[in-house]
Amino acid sequence: MPDLASHHLPATDRTVFFVSDGTGITAETFGHSVLTQFELRFKQIRLPFIDTLDKARDAVRRINEARDIDGKRPIVFSTLVKADLSMVVRQSNGMHMDLIQTFVEPLEQELGVKSTHTIGRSHNIADSDEYKNRIEAINFSLAHDDGQSNKNLAMADVILVGVSRSGKTPTSLYLAMQYGIKAANYPLIPEDFERGKLPGGLLPYKNKIFGLSITADRLAEVRNERRPGSKYAALENCRYEINEAEKMMRREGIRWLSSTVKSIEEIATMILQELKSDKRAY
């Protein structure tokens, strides 16, 4: 008799490791971009700060253990800079995607210059100004989250508006952390709809406003997780708020998009395109 439990998981599931001598964020970001091209499920494990031979051997042990459990080679995305550590990890029973070997070594040949092979080079003192800008932007976004403050809105790069739980806060923080964008956000509430106008504090900065909307079904689902069974989460109320918010945005000439089926990364990219911002943080 077949094992019915096995039908709940695709036969092609794999374990994926992101191995780095730093935080592992670069390996993970690159790996995610590649893995999204495949309609498969992956168990993802980050192994950061692999900066000694002992840690490299432990990484090998974990990769081999996954191979034995899964019966398939794990996929290993690596950004290990030191050759001796990379060599140890490459001895594991995984399918290796070495970003340093793939990109840095060919660039050394093309540029005729040896790379520094420095761990954490992307986060050194040279980009301290960019780092400070991002910290300032994060602090600004936190201080201006959910309409907490009207102060210093002239400093905002963008002001996100939309009904409560339409994705304004995560988008604001993502813009701040990734791009150093100072993003404020304001919820549009029933009182605004009754008045038929934007909150007064936003009017001088209308050219900075960008709107987010969402489908009523998805909004009700999100709100029910927070306040189940409330009027706030009721589908009819969600429909009312969304309709009124979209009418207001159209009337005021505010650019907006629906966050329902878009990732935070997609939303942020579209906002940046609209702003024609040249801010970047690497």
Image (cartoon, grey):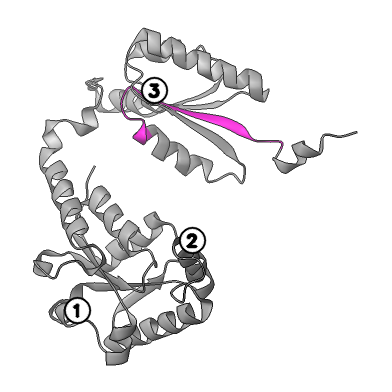
Does any portion of residue 196 appear in the rendered image?
no
Q: Say whether disc 3 or disc 1 marks the residue closer to the N-terminus.
A: 3
**Image check: 136 left or right of 191?**
left
How far apart are the two marked residues, 3 and 1, measured between alpha carbons? 49 Å
Q: Which residue is mark 1?
A: 206
Magenta includes 131?
A: no
Whether 132 is drawn above or below 105: the answer is: below
Whether 66 is drawn above or below 215: the answer is: above
* Residue density around tag 3, few if under 14, some if 14–19, many if 20 or more, within 10 Å: some
Per the rendering, the mark at residue 101 is 3
Q: Which residue is mark 2?
A: 225
- Residue bounds of the magenta highlight: 11-26
- Quadrant for the N terminus in the image: top right
Q: In the rendered structure, which amino acid carries the disc numbered 2?
A: Glu
Q: Residue at x 51, y 34 (%)?
A: 44
Percent position (x, y) of residue 243?
Answer: 43, 84
Check if mark 3's residue and mark 2's residue have beta carbons within 8 Å. Answer: no
| Residue most extreme to the front | 229
Percent position (x, y) of residue 196?
Answer: 29, 91
Q: Say whether disc 3 or disc 2 marks the residue closer to the N-terminus.
A: 3
Q: In the rendered structure, which amino acid carries the disc numbered 3?
A: Gln
Q: Nearer the viewer, residue 165 or 85?
A: 165
Does any portion of residue 168 appear in the rendered image?
yes
Indicate the secondary structure of the residue bearing disc 1: helix
